Amino acid sequence: MSTLSLSLWSVAALLVLIGLRVPIGVALGAVAFGGFWALRGVDVAFSVLRETPFVFAANWDLTAIPMFLLMGALVNNSGLGEAIFRAARVWLSGLPGGLAVASNIASAGFAAASGSSIAAAAAMARVAIPEMLRHGYDKALAAGVVASAGTLAALIPPSILFVLYGIFAEVSIAKLLIAGILPGLLTALVYTLMIVIRSRLDPALAPSAATESRAGLWRERIEALKPIWPLLVLILGVIGGLYAGVVTPTEAGAAGAALALVLGVIQRRLTLQRIVDSVREAVSTSALIFFIGMGAVMYTKFLAFAGVGSMFAEMIGDWAQQPLLLVIAMSIIYLVLGMFLDPIGIMLITIPVFVPMFAVLDLDLIWLGVLVVKYVEIGLLTPPVGFNVHVVKSVVGNAIPLETIFRGCGWFLLCEVVIMTLLIAFPEISLYLPNRMF
Amino acid sequence: MIDRLIARTESAARVFLWLAIAAGVLMMVHVTADVIGRTVFNHPLAGTTEIVSAYYMIAVSFLPWAWISAKEGHIRVEIFTASMSPHRRAWLDVGVTLLTLAYVVAFTWQTFERAMHATAVRESWEAPNGFLPVWLSHWMLPASGALMAAFLLLWVLAEIARLARGPAGRGV
């Protein structure tokens, strides 16, 4: 069987298995096993299964994942998400759509402590949506902003997706994490503009929630900042440490988790039970990611063995003058996959395919990383399987129908068209900070 | 009978999960101590990278598997099977679990062989202050795989028995 047909068969088999509800990790591993068997015989297939798991998991770079997850879980369980929202609220409630803007900015702040969009969306949904509904906000806007701004957690460091991308694409994880900052802030800014303009044009969407007198307001604003100083310490420690090159991502994650733990205990926000729950959450999510990752490593090895890289190099020969076409083709593929698959699954299935293509065209792999993470995050908002939308739905229960949340995300997806166009047209937005790192 | 065995497997899965939780805490403490030692006292803890990667990381990566299976935590895509009847979907789940079981059994078998080899040669990693034995850590893989396989097997048997008893599916 030719490389091309074997690779295509493997992709088809993968999609069929996933469609039949086979866990994604098993589908990737089983297809890789079958592929190696077809290519080199069953002994080679077994030897890949024998050697890969330990080598994959016993990896220093990968330890950033449990540590980032632990930091996010500790921050979440210590109630910092609520404090951030309250602070954003008293500062921003004067704007048109103030509570929605506050939810958006609070999500950006929370993203600086959390590396997982789904966790961030769940945390913010609990505090922000009831508050917006209480003030008579449009349901679609209230739920849409929380689901959409949850995606900032994957862009603003720490980020689980950037760690995985860095490992599979073999590029600097620290640079990727720093590269996500400006696109993350750009996303928050475009979202904010859209909310303000819409609320200005149609005040019924977001009735004013500002009630305090001017003097009282300033006192309240200063008071609201006090409980969130741990966040500023975390941002300074994690992002500052990474940017200055003082710590590796793993060290930033571990020290960040330890700091969140100490601060949570000092502030009496963390009980022993909450600490244990946080660690359990972090290790079980990590194990789940590694189960998929192990399958993905074997699938990546299989594609490399089958010679997919050189096949793409030949295929792309004519396109070489038109990298934009590749980016557009990639965009379409991600949008389609994003409708059905989970974020980590999409990343681990597509990286082995796209990274060699980008490498052939000599395009920047850090820039590709930012685009991939953005697309994967957009997939969290698109129907029918928009994970963030389902997470928000599970928090709000019967208060808001699923269709309404998807409709609310529609406006933010329009913003994403603008943001992606900017990110594709100006790679410098993604590359400015990492190119100036120490 | 099967229910009792499942309960026992779940207890073992919880023990494994607690070990993983302990490894997660140790990872945080050990790495933080190394960062403080290095940046504040100019005295890093030798071998941190190796111990964290070879022991804590392996524990965190593999030990929770059986517990996750018991919680049905694996990511699945529901969209194409949403229109199936509950009974059909239950049989599809049996088939999918059998495939998962085959994969996990192959994993357990191969990592067992690998652990035997690592033990025979007393596999070690070079660390800044000597050699770190890692053969012991290799055993966490087949142990985790075997426990997950045991759980999946018992679940499939219980499910087949239930489905064979009558057509009323459980509305998965």
Image (cartoon, helix red, strand yellow):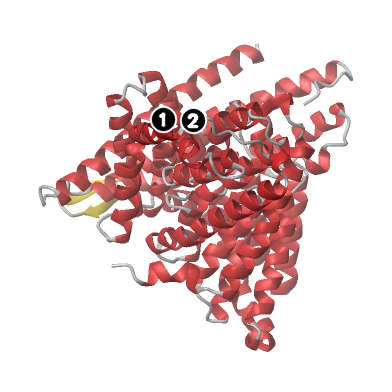
* Along the viewing direction, whichever of A78 and A210 lies nearer the viewer: A210
* Element class at badge 2: loop
Q: Position of residue B162 (x, y in %)?
A: 79, 18
Quarter that holds the C terminus of chain A? bottom left
Residue A158 appears in the picture as rendered: yes
Packing grade of label 1 (10 A; few <14, some 14-19, many >=20) is few
Residue B53 appears in the picture as rendered: no
The residue lying at 71 percent from left, 59 percent from top is A335
Quarter that holds the N terminus of chain A? bottom right
Type of the residue with mark 1: Gly
* In the image, farthest residue toward the front: A214
Q: Which mark is residue A212?
A: 2
* Element class at badge 1: helix
The residue to which callout 1 is attached is A216
Whether label 2 touches label 1, CB < 8 Å:
yes
The residue lying at 67 percent from left, 52 percent from top is A412
